[in-house]
Image (spheres, rainbow, N blue to C red):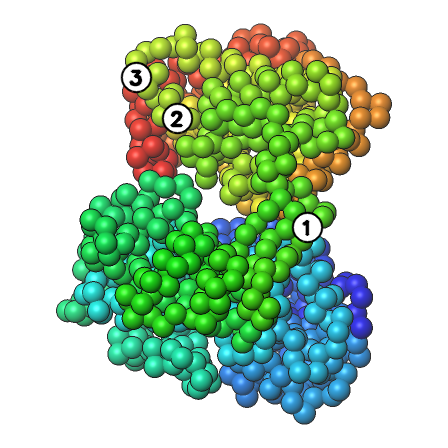
Amino acid sequence: MTSEIKHVAVIGGGIMGGGIAALFANQQIGASVFDLDLPLAKKCIALLEDPNAKIPLLYTTKYAKYIKPFAISQYAEELGKADVIIEAVPEVMKIKKQTFQEIDKHRKPGSIVATNTSGLSVSGMVDGCSEDMRKHFLGTHFFNPVRFLPLVELIPGKDTVPGVIETMRDYFVRIGKKPVVGRDTPNFIANRVGIFQIMKVFQLMEKYGLSVDQIDMITGPALGNPRTATFRLADMVGVDTLYHAAMNQYQNCPDDEEREHLKPTALLDRMVSEKKLGEKTKCGFFTKEKDKIKTLDVKSWEYKDKTEPKSDVVRGARGYARAADRIRAMMGSSQWPGGDDVVCRFSREIVLASAAYAMNRIGEVAGDLLTIDNAMKWGFAKEVGPIEILDSIGLEKSAEMMQECSIRVPQALKDAIGSTRTLCKQTPVETLYFDVGSKSMKSVPARADAILLKALKDRNKVVRENLSARIYDLDDGVLLLEIASSILPEMNPIDDYVISMIGQAIREVKKGHRALVIGSQGQNFCAGANIQMMLEMAKARMFTQIEQVSMALQMANMALYHADFPVVTAPHGLTLGGGQEITLAGQVRVAHAELYCGLVEVGVGLVPAGGGCLQLLAQLIETTAKDKPGPMPPAMKALDLIGWGRVSKSAHDAIDQGLLRPTDVIVFDKDLQIRRAKEVAIGRLTGFEPIPQRELTLPGKGGFYVIEDNLKGALKQKKVTEHSLVIALKQARILTGGERASSVNPVDENYILELEREEFVSLCGMPKTQERMAYMLKNGKPLIN
Ligand code: NAD
């Protein structure tokens, strides 16, 4: 059997085939894409290569070079080279069977062959194929978009030999995916439960007379789901895809206790017959008319202006940071005041019906409840699993509420109430779950190869903490500084608490440790500075205080970069503005592959002033010196990155753009990022020398005038606004080295930092910058005024 994956073949270069080919190309593994003819295969690669793709599936478009197009008529010459072959042709059994008959003729013995079917019988597809192929055959069910949804369901066929599942599981874990092993049942795990949930929403919508906009308000983040909620998701996935998946479940699960509820409703029937299929036909539950979003009114069957429904229950629930608290607030209780609100009644029914349905699938679609919950979290981006939520509600209370809602209480829930009284529990060393067979808690040990911050907290490894940051002892002389906002945990903005904790971390290392890592394990590393605070100070004209805040962050970042011990930063997810400035303060960065970083201060009318201009310039001088000598190229490059607020599409892209160094480290498995950062920090200890203060050779006034001319030309051509020009000129002044620099007069670090502060403060005083800040706070996107 294949032991190392060096080359893959993907059959069918559509939505999923393209995503799967990109997944391997991102690992710099060659992928041959086969489609009905060569132009179709080439089209697949062209879409992946598009630098303006709405969802970039490649880490960097240059990785498209690893993907080669072929027609299926070329199987004979090409297929034998592949160690792994993954099929992603249309969801039609006959086409799949024919495809596997062909593959069987040309594959090399021992190669692993997989189907990406969403829910057809895996074993049924290879009936009649050779024994070697059946032995090496499995389902690898990816979720769309392949790069961004971590789940891969691995489905053994009836003849799959041991080792095939393990090989694929280990490989996927290594590249940062989250595989789960399911069973060969219709729609497998996540879609089986997910389809039930969506069909249930359709029924409850009718029962409670709710509109499409109201349903999306209720079933989004307030119930622990992504913002796409129900109907935006349906439009993205395709209403017909949903319909076929539901039909598959209805027709092939004759014993399902909810079978009658799996049948697509009349509404769904009508949408499919009228080709209201969502994004692919440009109309579904939503459509766009003259740039305005319209929602389908399911009563009048007309598209009307999208509404923003209001609900006190939803507003109240959104106030909770933890999803389980939000869900409980949404459910209310029939005995509490307000508990008979339609939102509460709807929420109770959908949460409890989903939990019951998922519990009844234990042993059928997967061996245990943990696998089902994980599949829902990793494939549908749910914050809480449908089963584990019952622990937060209380098991007895859940059973009572189920009865009130006429939902039959699952036997597994009754058993847990009578035995363990818990379904799921996480401790620092293990995850415990209720095993339905033995009616006892079973343990899955925590990954021994990962450092989990939650576990460190429970093991009293927190050295210090405040409202926005925490210091942990990682052992072996290494401390970790975590930016962990208690108010905005998703965004982790930088505030005084974070800056103060950087100073404390430096002092703690000096007291008896050897190195520092800055990282976290939430959704994002840090989405920037606290603009609310900055805007209030700007409006109150507290310019001295503004300068002090800027200087404090500059000093903290410089102290990190020039520290006499190793400092490693570990960015991931959104790493913007001040977050990127802290990243650049690491002497080495260990980045997660999914990194969206950039100095985006221009979006709020500002310039980076926490050392970001200085650090980016110095880094670009270092990295461009060989190919583009002279002081102008790095200054121009920095101006391009800062001026346009460019954000990387991945860690690889960040290196290509110059936002990280080519020598920085990239980690694919996010769970291993902190451990790797710690190893890198320890690796730097031998012979460690602090980085000395730098002198920067910059173009000075001469360079500034060239840029000024260009920018004024852009204004004349109305390519930039007047305020954008003002900001760009201030950026240019800093990046060319102000009044002191010239190609023969290098300037020191402090001078660039002074320029950063001066221009930052002056911009804060400008009404148009304040408008940009206020707009960002209100709308979450930049204003170009
Ligand atoms: P798609 O229609 O986008 O792509 C199918 C591709 O296969 C097309 O490029 C088509 O030209 C090509 N093709 C057709 N017949 C072929 C043949 N005989 N040999 C080679 N190529 C052929 O479909 P998709 O959405 O990528 O779905 C592919 C598979 O993945 C299906 O089984 C689907 O159920 C499954 N899936 C889809 C999603 C999703 O969200 N789209 C998610 C998970 C799984």
Residue 672, quarter of the rendered image: top right
Q: Is residue 394 above or below residue 675?
A: below
Residue 116, quarter of the rendered image: bottom right
Q: Nearer the viewer, residue 673 or 594?
A: 673
Report, in whole angstroms, how far the alpha carbon at label 3 lies from the one at label 2: 12 Å
Q: Which mark is residue 318?
A: none
Residue 765 in sight in this render: yes
Q: Nearer the viewer, residue 374 or 69?
A: 374
In the rendered structure, the answer to whether residue 327 lies left or right of residue 77 reads: left
Residue under circle 1?
A: 447
* Residue 47 x/y as whole percent: 53, 60
* Residue 361 x/y as whole percent: 49, 72
Which badge, 3 or 2, comes first in the chain's sequence? Answer: 2
Q: Is residue 251 above or below residue 466?
A: below
Q: Which mark is residue 531?
A: 2
* Residue 733 x/y as whole percent: 50, 17
Residue under circle 3?
A: 539
Quarter holding the C terminus?
top left
Categorize mark 3 by other alpha carbons within 10 Å: few (<14), some (14-19), many (20+). Answer: some
